[in-house]
Image: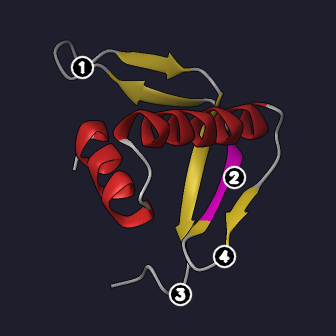
Amino acid sequence: MNKAQLIDAIAGKSGLTKADSKKALDAAIEAVTEALQAGDRVALVGFGSFSVSERSARTGRNPQTGKEITIAAKKVVKFKPGAELQV
């Protein structure tokens, strides 16, 4: 499912117009993004939770040359599905 299909599904289930559904989806994505950038955890009961985790620096290997390279530390987003979402 892509974003346009998700907007159609939201419009169909909520009775909102597609334009209003797009605004609602964009606002929700923006709010989640801002919370994660601030280091907060976003929990949606029944769906799951998003959190930010620190991935430490490590050494890797360039598959073309076999030479060792250093992979920098970075922050990554993790998603843990809720009980109702697990298949």
Which quadrant of the structure image shows residue 4?
top left
Residue in the picture at 61% in, 35% down: 27
Between disc 2 and disc 3, the foreground one is 3
Label 1 is placed on what type of residue? Answer: Gly
Sequence-wise first label, 3 or 4: 4
- The residue to which callout 4 is attached is 45
Sequence-wise first label, 4 or 1: 4
- The residue to which callout 2 is attached is 51
- The label number, if any, that marks residue 83 in the structure image: 3
Label 2 is placed on what type of residue? Answer: Ser
Range covered by the magenta-colored residues: 49-54
| SS at circle 2 | strand
| SS at circle 1 | loop
Q: Are marks 2 and 1 in contact (CB under 8 Å)?
A: no
Residue in the picture at 48% in, 38% down: 20
Between disc 4 and disc 1, the foreground one is 4
Calculate the distance from the C-alpha at mark 2 to the C-alpha at mark 1.
34 Å
Instruction: Pick the residue in front: 63 or 86.
Output: 86
